[in-house]
Image (spheres, rainbow, N blue to C red):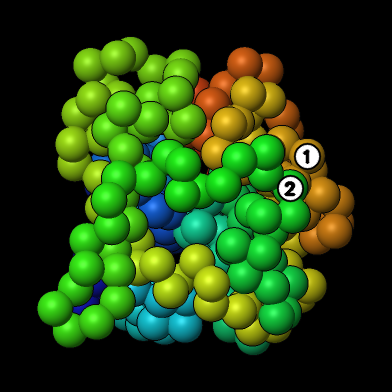
């Protein structure tokens, strides 16, 4: 038995299907996938919503690789925002990974960082929407999204109360993680799917479309009116795309 026990719907379990491993990004947590998870479980998929450490790109990618190994069998990796950079690195040369799904996610090329891509396309500087950094006693700085900016930048299409709860429970990212340069990306080796909101105010849709085109996406879906947290506001569309990737040949 593996040390990671994927959540699954026993009555629908189909062991020939890949396990879905989902990796959240900065300023949210694994609970951000709960609407997607519920829909995948209803269809009989085994699911692992990873608690991404958000400590550094190679550190986080190694953590995800270890989870993939522990789960065993074939997997589909799904990344949101910074989590896209993580799955791009974690899946490289990994035979267990069948496909990649990028949800409002970064897909950096080798040598690129999340900051590089954000600065290249964004109409704002990240500093203007962050709370005061938390300085770690051991060195480094942790970044949080300002509570006053959280819904406007990330979640305009979800209810105010839910956005406030998410802002209060957000997980910080190490400042250095955003500047870490990516290694060789798995999207050059494996089929990928991209989905993002047309009203994403955190990662510009033009940047997301650029990365999808560069990765030769199998299918790219721009969800009209959706925000950066499209997996929260439109979980059915995200789940449908994941299933499409899982069933691909």
Residue 88 appears in the picture as rendered:
no
Q: Residue at x 58, y 31 (%)?
A: 201
Q: Residues within 10 Å of mark 1 (few under 14, many from 20)?
A: few
Quadrant (top left, top right, bottom left, bottom right) of the N terminus = bottom left
Q: Residue at x 27, y 51 (%)?
A: 132
| Whether residue 112 is visible | yes
Mark 2 highlights which residue? 121
**Dividing the picture into quarters, in which one does residue 163 lie?**
top left
Q: CA distance from mark 2 to mark 1?
A: 7 Å
Task: Find residue 139 and report its image quarter.
Answer: bottom left
User: In the rendered view, would you say 61 is above or below 148?
Assistant: below
**Position of 161 compared to 24: left or right?**
left
Q: Quadrant of residue 87?
A: bottom right
Callout 2–callout 1 Cβ contact below 8 Å: yes
In the picture of the structure, the residue carrying the numbered disc 1 is 206
Dot 2, crowdedness within 10 Å: few (<14), some or many (≥20)?
A: some
User: Residue 142, percent across and down?
Assistant: 28, 63
Left or right side of 116 for 42: left
The answer to which of 30 and 57 lies nearer the viewer is 57
Could you tell me which residue is drawn at 46 percent across and 16 percent down? 157
Q: Is residue 110 above or below residue 45?
A: below
Q: Nearer the viewer, mark 2 or mark 1?
A: 2
């Amino acid at each position: 038995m593996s040390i990671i026990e994927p959540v699954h719907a026993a009555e629908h379990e189909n062991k020939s299907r890949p396990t879905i491993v989902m990796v959240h990004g900065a300023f949210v947590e694994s609970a951000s996938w709960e609407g997607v998870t519920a829909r995948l479980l209803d269809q009989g998929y085994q699911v692992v919503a990873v608690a991404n450490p958000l400590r550094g790109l190679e550190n986080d990618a190694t953590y995800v690789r270890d989870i993939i190994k522990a789960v065993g069998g074939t997997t589909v990796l799904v990344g949101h925002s910074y989590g896209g950079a993580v799955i791009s690195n974690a899946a490289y040369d990994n035979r267990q990974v069948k496909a990649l799904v990028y949800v409002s996610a970064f897909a950096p090329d080798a040598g690129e960082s999340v900051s590089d891509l954000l600065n290249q396309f964004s109409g704002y500087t990240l500093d203007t929407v962050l709370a005061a950094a938390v300085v770690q006693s051991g060195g480094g700085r942790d970044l949080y999204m300002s509570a006053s900016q959280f819904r406007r930048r990330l979640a305009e299409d979800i209810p105010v109360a839910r956005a406030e709860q998410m802002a209060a429970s957000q997980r910080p990212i190490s400042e250095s993680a955003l500047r870490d340069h990516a290694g060789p990306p798995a999207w050059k080796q494996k089929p990928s799917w991209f989905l993002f909101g047309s009203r994403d105010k955190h990662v510009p849709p033009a940047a997301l479309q650029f990365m999808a085109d560069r990765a030769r996406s199998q299918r790219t879906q721009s969800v009209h009116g959706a925000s950066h947290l499209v997996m929260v506001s439109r979980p059915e569309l995200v789940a449908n795309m994941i299933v499409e990737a899982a069933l691909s040949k």
